[in-house]
Image (tube, helix red, strand yellow):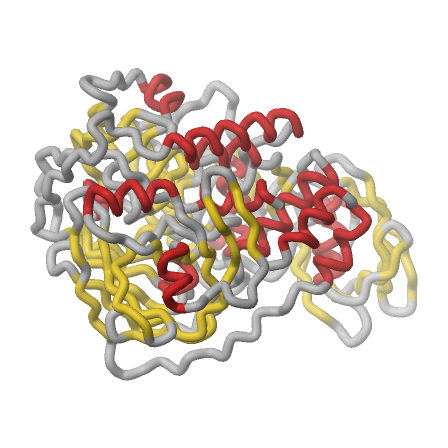
Amino acid sequence: MKMLWSCAALAVFCLAPPGRAEEPTKPPPKSFQVPYRLTKPKHILVRAKINGKGPYNFIVDTGAPALFVAVPVARKLGVKSESNGWGTFDRFEIEGGVVLTKVKGRVETPPQVEGMNGLGLAGVELHGMIGYNILARYRMEIDLTRDKMIWTPLDYKPKESKSLAGKGRGGSEIDLLGGILKSLGSLLGTKASPPVRLRGFLGVELKDGADFPIVQSVLADGPAGKAGVKPGDQITHIRGRGVTDTSDVQRFLDRLVVGDDVKLTVQRGKEKKDIAVKIGEGL
Amino acid sequence: MKPRYLLLALMGLSLVLPLLAAEPPSVKPIEKPKAKPVVVPFELLRSGHMAVMIKVNGKGPYRVIFDTGAPINLLNNKLAKEVGLLKDAPTSTLPFLGTIGEAKVKELEVGTEKTTDQFAIVMDHPLVELMSKKLGPLYGIVGFPFFARYKMTIDYQAQTLTFVPNGFKPPNVMRSMEKTMVQLMLGGSQTPKVLSPAGQWGLVAHKEAADEEAGVVIKKVLAGGAAATAGIKPGDRLLTIDGRWTDTLADLYEVASHLKAGVAVPVSIQRDGKAMELKVKPRAGL
């Protein structure tokens, strides 16, 4: 239980360290549709390519005074921290078309990111946060009932944010919590982002019928087409298990991988047929 | 929040399932969109953070940080005591974080915008305490449980937040984190996530391991399928779908998992070095 509280503390991306503004580039006067997703703990996550590499995952965080880029990412990009932890990122492109040049950012792995990644709490690997020195250049419309944000460039130069603690790093307790959760994660063998599997492919269009899903059309060159499935066939069973609608078929297919052999039982007119289909790749 | 039960849950795993089953469904009433957007001014702190004034159950105002990176509302013990938030709630004490508990806030006002029935974690967050010392009193953080209910516009130039109710019902993040942690304790290993396209595209894509260029390469376009109808050809490099990068097969399937059949979406491709925009309408199939 106590760990959960630690997670709660960590989940709050609110950092005390300093920010220092750099010269903003002249933004084009147009709005951007910025796609985002919500992580498991409900952080707004956007993807960004830095110097053409990536994409990397960043939290949109008004609680961060600046851009934070995790140390391993900066190292991979060959971006060195110049003085007291700041680095310059020549080209920072946020998914949806937002491009910034010569952006200054902190080269450091915030303990929150370390902790979240260590336990896989976000459901995706985090690489940093986008904070004040970038966010302040846009009027941001965030509506979680839509799948994209709208960012409109402002003619506004973010103020220099002042250093708070002399050394810049605040909250050593939070550092400690991040470390604890990270090592716990490594004990449990948790990965920051869970492994993914791509669903296999049949190549049929389906619609729901009275009792069974009905094949509407078949891509001749797809796995089902090659195996002899025909439009009008009603799929009654997959691997001997009954199906009644298209979502049943979807669920079955989710569990199969490319190369699996499956037996489809179809009702074709009065005839019942078993058809062997090899699950293919594609979508 | 029942810390004692959860502590048990984490140690004695047999108790876990009933606890999860008892999770209350989110039954927040949908707020009807109001005609007028509410404009709330914020203070830009010299640290680059934004601060707003809130009232809790009619008491206040209290100055708090407004943080899109906070999945929970967080209020400190001083505020909780003044407002009487933790009166009936179970609490625990942690070495770094002081007294901690979860409180239901009947009424939370941000500027003039009032919401009801929000959860807040009461805790003296070390970073907030630090900032409080340097920047004047700060009583906590307002985040996701509040702003998720609105179409929110953040304007640093005007120093305003604008809220229009959007009917979104924010889930309780503490609950979902509990679930994740309990799953970790139970299973240890993570189950692979199946990326399952919501519509049928009629294409096969490919990406060489050594290929570091943007996009994936179309390996095959099935005759008569949605991709073929849209004019996609084998050898095309698929760069974005609906404005989202498709740099890996996982990206491609992830995007496709969100796009319903029957709705045309813009697709950008590269053919013979030239950029092109096409529209693809995925079909109901798989």
Q: Is residue B121 above or below residue A11?
A: below
Q: Is residue A52 or residue B47 the one in the foreground? A: B47
Which quadrant holds residue A199?
top right
Q: Is residue B1 or residue A232 the one in the foreground? A: B1
Q: In this view, does A160 lie above or below B164?
A: above
Taking the spot 38% from the left edge, 74% from the top edge, the residue there is: B57
Taking the spot 17% from the left edge, 65% from the top edge, the residue there is: B41
Q: Image check: B49 left or right of A213?
A: left
Taking the spot 17% from the left edge, 56% from the top edge, the residue there is: B43
Q: Position of residue A235 (x, y in %)?
A: 81, 61
Taking the spot 19% from the left edge, 56% from the top edge, the residue there is: A139
Q: Where is residue B115 in the image (x, y as percent from the top left)?
A: 38, 74
Tag count: 0
Which quadrant holds residue B139?
bottom left
Q: Image check: A181 left or right of B158?
A: right
Residue B130 is at least partly visible in this image:
yes
Q: Image check: A8 left or right of A17?
A: right
Q: Is residue A154 or residue B246 the one in the foreground? A: A154
Q: Position of residue B36 (x, y in %)?
A: 24, 81
Q: Is residue A85 or residue B266 the one in the foreground? A: A85
Q: Position of residue A140 (x, y in %)?
A: 24, 56
Residue B224 is at least partly visible in this image:
no
